[in-house]
Amino acid sequence: MKTQVFISGGGIGGLALALKLVQRDVDVIMAERLKAKASTYKGELLQPKSMQIFDSLGMYDEITARGNEIKILDMLELSSSLHVKDQSFMDYSVLPGKYNAAFMVHHEELKEILLNAAKEYRNFHYMPGTSCTGYTDNKALLKAGKEQFEVEADFFFGAEGRASVTRKHMEIDIKQSTYNHHFLTVSFPRPENFTDGQIISTYNRFLGLFPLPDNQVRSVYLIPEGDYKELKEKPISHFHKLYTDLAPAMDGYVQQLTDWKKIQLMIPVMFHAPAYVKDNKAIIGDAAHAVHPMAGEGMNMAIQDADILGELTADMISRHKADPENLKWYEKVRYKRAEHVLQLSHLAALAYSYPFKPISFLRQRTFERMEEDPILHFKQMLNVSGLGMWKENVRDRFIQGGIMPVRMRNLPNEKKELRYYTQEDDYPWKAEGLL
């Protein structure tokens, strides 16, 4: 079998990459290990940059029609007696333009949307139940059941997740960081009027609620590392109470969960591969970087990787500049952006990791000042959205800590938009003579 691009892994990132390529007349073979829907929890929160990318692929209307729009994340800090002592908001509407909301979409539905769109193209060849087991010089070694075969390609892209065969073949070593906590995650019915996200915390507890369509809500509950086994031995009513203590609005809904088997354990890790590209191979998504799930950025980072790598590869092929050395443009664009998101997510994780009241107070103060200062609020939402990057400076830190007063002035939309990534930022090689 021969193709122009071989993709190992048919998750959201791999499918977004494939769709981008086949829409540009590139021939693609994709091998996906799973035959059926994944049973494990995967990301479901689509940030504004991902929606911008899907819009460019012609998928915006279908995805929004099958998703739940989130304009606001409500941040509640509770006292020891579980009364609200502080409330702040992360408001996507501070982002000017069309892409000023996040969307919650069932992961498997999003995969289905992307897969069906790619299948409309005759140059897309999908191989479910097929694993990439390794590589020779210019061939991918595949296995489907007992059958083994090879695919010859010009380029090989790994989108297999953390245990990436492609990354291992590229001899790229990673150093993985772990955390002192895990998460319980599960979806269950929600009140019909509960449509915005909510993050509820005390000095030693954390619950995130993210509404899905079809009156469902995805939840994440932080537990200390090693507590899962002991928790599972308790009656399911104990789990219900963990939720209803923090979110009384879920009373009568979370109780519809009757079996611990539906509740999954999620173990957060973080790593950043030192390189994304080697020769004619590249890695995207969790194969290249694993992010703490606190900000819900993992899937979005994979989509953004796919956008840059797909556009670059299609340009290389259409311009007859298929020298693998040109793949380095992908790494130049994405590496610093990914590093910034990893650090932001890591800091957010640390803010909720330690059960001490002084940390709770600092967290509360930081979010409060962030909401009160329009520039800080915009910076936060810009960085989370993926639409641009504006790093915090010393003055920002002093404002968050209460050492300096908040700024009351807001930025006009035209100045905010200057902070957005431009086409030249996303695809710098398109400039004349660069590729």
Image (tube, rainbow, N blue to C red):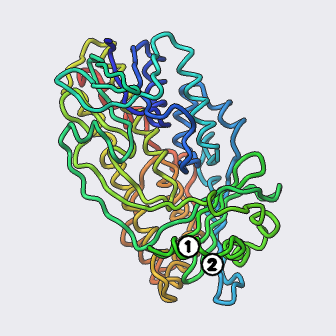
Q: Which of 421 and 274 is in front in this view?
A: 274
Q: Is mark 2 on a helix, strand or loop?
A: strand
x and y percentages locating residue 395 in the rendered image: 40, 72
Quadrant housing residue 347:
bottom left
x and y percentages locating residue 114 in the rendered image: 56, 28
27 versus 168 height, above or below: above
Q: Residue at x 40, y 65 (%)?
A: 346
Left or right: 154, with 338 as reference point = left
Instruction: Point out the frontmost of discs 1 and 2.
Output: 2
Q: In which quarter of the image is the C terminus?
A: top left
Mark 2: which amino acid?
Answer: Glu
Quadrant housing residue 321:
top left
Left or right: 415, with 77 as reference point = left
Other residues around mark 1 within 10 Å, as few (<14) / some (14–19) / many (≥20): many
Mark 1: which amino acid?
Answer: Phe
Left or right: 408, with 245 as reference point = left
Among the two numbered marks 1 and 2 on one chain, the one whose residue lies closer to the N terminus: 2
140 versus 339 height, above or below: above
Q: Which residue is drawn at 78% across and 61% down?
A: 256
171 versus 22 height, above or below: below
Q: Residue at x 44, y 30 (%)?
A: 32
Q: Quadrant of the N terminus?
A: top left
Q: How far apart are marks 1 and 2 (CA)?
A: 10 Å
x and y percentages locating residue 30 in the rendered image: 41, 24
In the rendered picture of this protein, how many numbered marks are placed on residues?
A: 2
Label 1 belongs to which residue?
367
Q: Determine contact: label 1, label 2, CB under 8 Å.
A: yes
The circle drawn on residue 77 is 2
